[in-house]
Amino acid sequence: KDPRSLSAAFVRYIYEDHNGLIWVGFETSGLSYLNPATGQFTRITRNARGEEVSGNIIFSLLEYPAGVIWAGSESGLNKISFSKNNSGQYHYSIKNFGEANGLSDKSVNGILADNKGFLWIGTIKGLLRFDIRNERFRNYLPSLDFSFSCAYKFNEHQLFFGSSEGFVMFDPNKVSQNDFLPRVVISSLRLFNKEVEIGGTYNGDIPFKTAITTAPGLTLGYQNNVFTLGFAGLHFSDP
């Protein structure tokens, strides 16, 4: 098959960059771009440095900033830095990001950019914010399953991500960051799946003579060898 032709029939995503190149993500054939001036496709394959796009299914594409294409696949996030030399030929470098780098899930289903240097990424395990300067991820809404190729930026104050439970709309400028680590305390004790009460006797043991939060310690005999500890993180803030 002609390598300058369409790689496959099943197209997942189409995106136009600032140069007018049309980027095409396929279901099983990776990523290509079309140069409208020549009518020819170029496939993004492994380059001379051995760098390549991770995954074959492209769910999302975004250029941010100019000259950098972000491609989300079933295997992670790909940064494709693109440039043209004096002879008019395009060259690219590729950097991959996966779960080992902080992704909550390797399937990158949607990508949007705000106006402050952050990418917002939808996965099946929540929403992430990616700082392109230090290349760090921060997780939000971990219980939500975000849909494939279903993200839209209405303006700088309204980003939309579709999910299995409707859609999420938010202003990225108003998403707060709280790095306070709550104090963790033991809140309950159960012996053989029964709640332990203050002063109660259980198989010869009196675990607590005061509230569990003020007890100096806990000693149990061998006969109380099935126990469950409950805990809580204490964080008092104004919602």
Image (cartoon, rainbow, N blue to C red):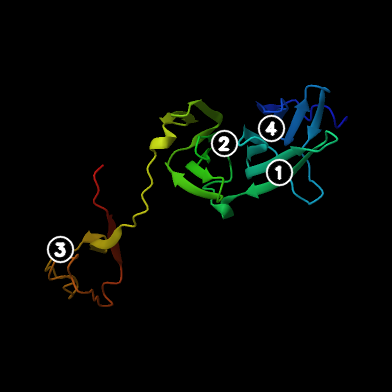
Disc number placed over residue 109 in the picture, else none:
2
Which residue is more in the foreground, 101 or 37?
37
**In the rendered structure, are the residues bearing label 1 and label 4 in contact, judged by CB atoms less than 8 Å apart?**
no
Distance, label 1 to label 2, CA atoms, is 15 Å
Q: In which quarter of the image is the C terminus?
A: top left
Q: What element carries label 3?
A: loop
Which mark sits nearer the N-terminus, 2 or 4? 4
Q: Nearer the viewer, mark 2 or mark 4?
A: 2
Residue depicted at x 54% and y 35%: 113
Q: In this view, does 23 lie above or below 125?
A: above
Corner quadrant of residue 212? bottom left
Distance, label 1 to label 3, CA atoms, is 58 Å
Which mark sits nearer the N-terminus, 4 or 3? 4
The kind of residue on which mark 1 rests is: Val
The kind of residue on which mark 3 rests is: Glu
Q: Is residue 220 above or below residue 89?
A: below
Q: Can residue 166 be seen in this view?
A: no
Q: What element carries label 4?
A: loop
